[in-house]
Image (cartoon, helix red, strand yellow):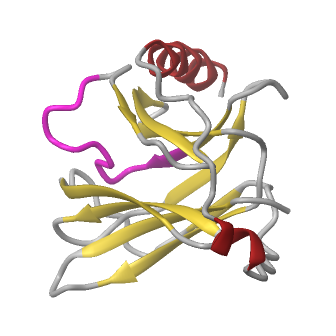
Amino acid sequence: MSALTRRLAAATTALAAVGAVSVTTLPAADAATSCRVRWGSQNKAINLSSPVTGTPVADLRTGHHACYDRVVFELKGRTGATVAGYVGTARSPQVIAVGSRTNLVPVGVKPGQALPTRFSTVRGVVYAGKVDGLDAVGIVTRARLPYRVFVVKGPGANNRVVVDVAHRW
């Protein structure tokens, strides 16, 4: 993971340079919402029986919900095995590395390129390139918070890899 950590650290620096790490204040309604997540912040894996390689990303979307921020990789076809975990040291911002044998990178995105967001928890998404045969994407967060990773089948033959990061413990 040291090569992955170095690549994501460089990409995180690029993200900070574009000013994507400003804090967004949550609306008052979010503060009153009861958010009970039991996801944890340990490494996670989705092991599918038939790994798929070279599946292109049709779309990369981010969203803000009452209890979490979401990053969605919509794939043209099925997804292969996917792993995720926090990388780097305990300094801010934190980075969840998502690696997959499926191409999680939208067409035209280069290694180190940052896609900023202005959410309270997810600060941006960066592509680290190929690391140990996996396409590595970093999701930059404001702190080491609970997260979950899952696959949604459809529409049609497509799949989506979804990463939710909680706003708080």
Q: Nearer the viewer, residue 20 or 83?
A: 20
Q: Which residues are magenta?
A: 98-110
Taking the image as shown, residue 14 lies to the left or right of residue 58, namely: right
Up the image or down, 138 lies above or below 29; here it is above
Up the image or down, 38 lies above or below 57; here it is below
Please give the name of the residue rendered at 58% of the width and 44% of the height, measured from the top-left corner: 24
Does residue 109 show up magenta in the picture? yes
Up the image or down, 129 lies above or below 162; here it is above
Taking the image as shown, residue 73 lies to the left or right of residue 49, namely: left
Main SS, magenta residues: loop
Q: Quadrant of residue 67?
A: bottom right
Q: Nearer the viewer, residue 6 or 124?
A: 124
Image quarter where the C terminus lies is: bottom right
Image quarter where the N terminus lies is: top right
Q: Where's residue 80, x and y in %?
A: 38, 63
Taking the image as shown, residue 12 lies to the left or right of residue 136, namely: right
Residue 138 visible, this orientation: no
